Amino acid sequence: MADLKARFEKAVADSKNLPEKPDNMTLLQIYSLYKQASAGDVEGKRPGFTDMVGRAKWDAWNGLKGKSTDDAMQEYVDLIESLK
């Protein structure tokens, strides 16, 4: 577990220095995996239709509901590694 957490934290740092900016769908995937790994299942109401960015983020995160912290961390690490 400590090893996974260390690799997750390194991937978070690496995500800020990717060679090129990922497309919007990949960015949503990065965001949702990070939030699921660090905060667990999404809580609160879905943003209104006028907040399209917030709504897309909420929907992506909500799509991971029930995924364990460890699984989300591992998928995040794998995704960042694939983007290097």
Image (cartoon, helix red, strand yellow):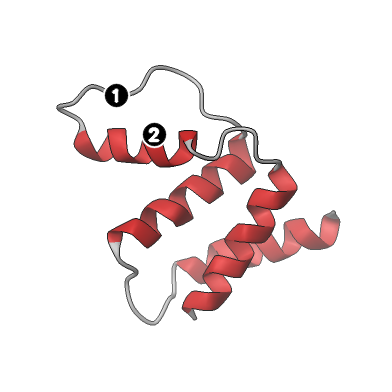
Question: Which residue matches tag 1?
Answer: 47
Using the image, determine if residue 45 lies above or below residue 81.
above
Q: Amino acid at mark 1?
A: Pro
The location of residue 4, given as percent across then percent down, is 77, 60
Instruction: Give the secondary structure at mark 2.
Output: helix
Check the image and report above or below for 49 versus 72.
above
Name the N-terminal-most of marks 2 and 1.
1
- Disc 2 marks a residue whose amino acid type is Trp
Question: Observer-nearest residue: 16 or 50?
Answer: 50
Q: From the viewer's perspective, tell me whether residue 55 is left or right of residue 9.
A: left
Instruction: Verify CB contact (< 8 Å) between mark 2 and mark 1.
Output: yes
Considering the numbered disc 1 on the image, is that residue within a helix, a strand or a loop? Answer: loop
Query: Residue placed at 44% from the left, 54% from the top?
Result: 29
Where does the image place residue 17, in percent across and percent down from the top left? 44, 74
Res 58 quadrant in image = top left
Q: Is residue 25 left or right of residue 79?
A: left
Residue drawn at point x = 30 percent, y = 66 percent: 23
Q: In the rendering, which numbered label is found on residue 58?
A: 2
From this viewpoint, which residue is outermost toward the left? 50
Classed neighbour count for the residue bearing mark 1: other residues with Cα under 10 Å, few (<14), some (14–19), many (≥20): some
Q: Which quarter of the image is occupied by the N terminus?
A: bottom right
Q: Quadrant of residue 37?
A: top right
